[in-house]
């Protein structure tokens, strides 16, 4: 008898699963092109079934390693510099995000995260009896690190003005300008780059390696996702600025590396003031980097807290199996994809992917880290200008942005917290400088947050 309904889909999935198994052994193929042809067929079929028909992902077996291999072979992360077929890239990305969602639910990740989060709470403490899951203390210390980074940036801003004429200044003129800003140079030399932030970086690095292991580096292959690699190598001043001013925020930032890189400007500028190493090419590159800083006082408040955002991501993976960070990865990757492809042609795929990674939201609405990450994603959309095109527009079609706001209301419904109040205040502060589609989205976000906190509010479905 012919199989019907779900049985038909199950049988098709079983056959596709066998093809996936062959893709895991490239030696079975006469050429790389044959392997690519097979993997692309598997990706396109599986993505359509999982993201558009609610087919169970587990029916296809363990495909995460093969997906990562495909991403590496096709250079999906740098898709804008390749001639990769956009339709395939969209399907690979949506399927990869759907696969990552359950992959982040690993006890080994939670164990590493317990140490990583604890290292924030432990910052500067020698008391081994401290509560290693003291999230309140961890948040306070993350804010202290952000304060150090911000203090460094403000000093750099003043120094930027001192060297604003760039190549038009002689070295002697530059030295005189810097002497008039010697207090800012001293600030950079003074800012604490304590060994305790290095301890945080150690535990973040351990988590990073475990994340690579359980996901087979699939997170690294997603379009638009950035990482601050090599936590214990010296970071250049210009690289530190790049990470802090990037349109797409990196998912992992190592605090001591950032602080030391930014504050490394202090002794370099001291050398100029005192007449040493003024012909150093690296020093000249550092001075050129100052021109890219822009006015840091105009940066949105939410962009001034990289460590606090980092902590929230870690807490989300620890407490909610990566629920919110998967949503963030979805929007980061989607923003990159939409810069080069149409959203309408993939409407069902995007909606289906979003539903597949958020359908179990009820389990995770009590996590502060999860709430914070979702709030940050909303702030990113409302307050960051799109990389290309009309600055009044948001980078996402309304049909998917509205789904995010519904999810936010459901997760925040009835939840207290000063972190929600802080976001509302920041959004209100940003209102005068935002217009067009972004203003409408911001207004809607404020409305949704207010509705979620109203007495008697109920979730939306």
Image (cartoon, grey):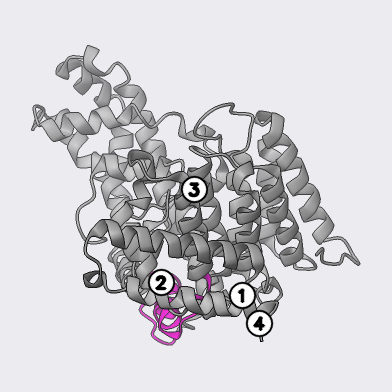
Label 3 crowd bin: few (<14), some (14–19), many (20+), radius 10 Å: some
Question: Which residue corresponds to the image point at 68% horizontal and 70% vertical from the top-left?
Answer: 359
- Please name the residue that numbered disc 4 is placed on: 3
- Please name the residue that numbered disc 2 is placed on: 64
Query: Is the C-beta separation of discs 2 and 4 under 8 Å?
Result: no
Q: Which mark is residue 9?
A: 1
Kindly report the distance in space between the C-alpha atoms of the residues bearing marks 2 and 3: 20 Å
Q: Which mark is residue 196?
A: none
> Which of pointers 2 and 3 lies earlier in the amino acid sequence?
2
Q: Nearer the viewer, mark 2 or mark 4?
A: 4
Label 2 crowd bin: few (<14), some (14–19), many (20+), radius 10 Å: some
Residue 290 to residue 448: above or below = above
Kindly report the distance in space between the C-alpha atoms of the residues bearing marks 2 and 4: 29 Å
User: What segment is highlighted magenta in the picture?
Assistant: 101-129
Label 1 crowd bin: few (<14), some (14–19), many (20+), radius 10 Å: some
> Which of pointers 2 and 4 lies earlier in the amino acid sequence?
4
């Amino acid at each position: 008898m012919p199989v019907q309904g779900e049985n038909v889909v199950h049988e098709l999935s079983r056959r596709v699963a066998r093809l996936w198994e062959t893709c895991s052994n490239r030696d079975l193929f006469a050429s790389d092109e044959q392997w690519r042809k097979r993997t692309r067929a598997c990706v396109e079929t599986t993505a359509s079934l999982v993201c558009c028909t609610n087919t169970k992902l587990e029916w296809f077996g363990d495909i995460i390693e093969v997906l990562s291999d495909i991403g590496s072979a096709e250079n999906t992360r740098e898709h804008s510099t390749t001639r990769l077929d956009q339709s395939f890239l969209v399907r690979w990305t949506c399927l990869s995000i759907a696969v990552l969602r359950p992959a982040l639910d690993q006890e080994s990740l939670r164990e590493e995260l317990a140490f990583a989060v604890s290292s924030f709470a432990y910052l500067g403490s020698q008391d081994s009896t401290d509560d290693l899951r003291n999230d309140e203390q961890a948040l306070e210390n993350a804010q202290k690190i952000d304060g150090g980074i911000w203090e460094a940036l403000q000093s750099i801003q003043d120094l930027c003005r001192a060297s604003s004429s760039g190549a038009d200044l002689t070295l002697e003129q530059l030295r005189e300008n810097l002497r008039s800003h010697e207090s800012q140079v001293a600030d950079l030399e003074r800012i604490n780059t304590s060994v305790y932030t290095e301890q945080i970086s150690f535990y973040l690095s351990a988590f990073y390696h475990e994340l690579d292991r359980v996901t087979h580096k699939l997170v690294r292959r997603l379009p638009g996702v950035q990482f601050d690699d090599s936590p214990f190598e010296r970071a250049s001043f210009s690289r530190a600025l790049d990470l802090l001013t990037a349109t797409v925020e990196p998912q992992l930032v190592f605090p001591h590396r950032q602080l030391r890189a930014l504050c490394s400007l202090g002794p370099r500028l001291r050398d100029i003031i005192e007449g040493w190493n003024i012909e150093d090419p690296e020093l000249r590159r550092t001075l050129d980097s100052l021109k890219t800083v822009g006015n840091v006082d105009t940066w949105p408040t939410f962009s001034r807290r990289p460590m606090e955002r980092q902590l929230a991501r870690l807490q989300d993976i620890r407490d909610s199996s990566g629920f919110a960070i998967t949503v963030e990865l979805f929007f980061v990757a989607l923003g990159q994809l939409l810069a080069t492809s149409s959203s309408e042609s993939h409407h069902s795929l995007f909606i289906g992917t979003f539903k597949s990674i958020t359908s179990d939201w009820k389990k995770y609405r009590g996590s502060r880290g999860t709430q914070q990450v979702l709030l940050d994603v909303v702030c990113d959309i409302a307050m960051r200008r799109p990389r290309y095109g009309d600055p009044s527009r948001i980078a996402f079609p309304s049909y998917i942005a509205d789904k995010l706001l519904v999810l936010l209301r459901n997760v925040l419904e009835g939840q207290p917290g000063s972190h929600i109040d802080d976001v509302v205040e920041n959004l209100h502060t940003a209102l005068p400088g935002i217009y067009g589609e972004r203003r409408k989205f911001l207004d809607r976000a404020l409305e949704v947050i207010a509705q979620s906190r109203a007495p008697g509010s109920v979730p939306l479905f």
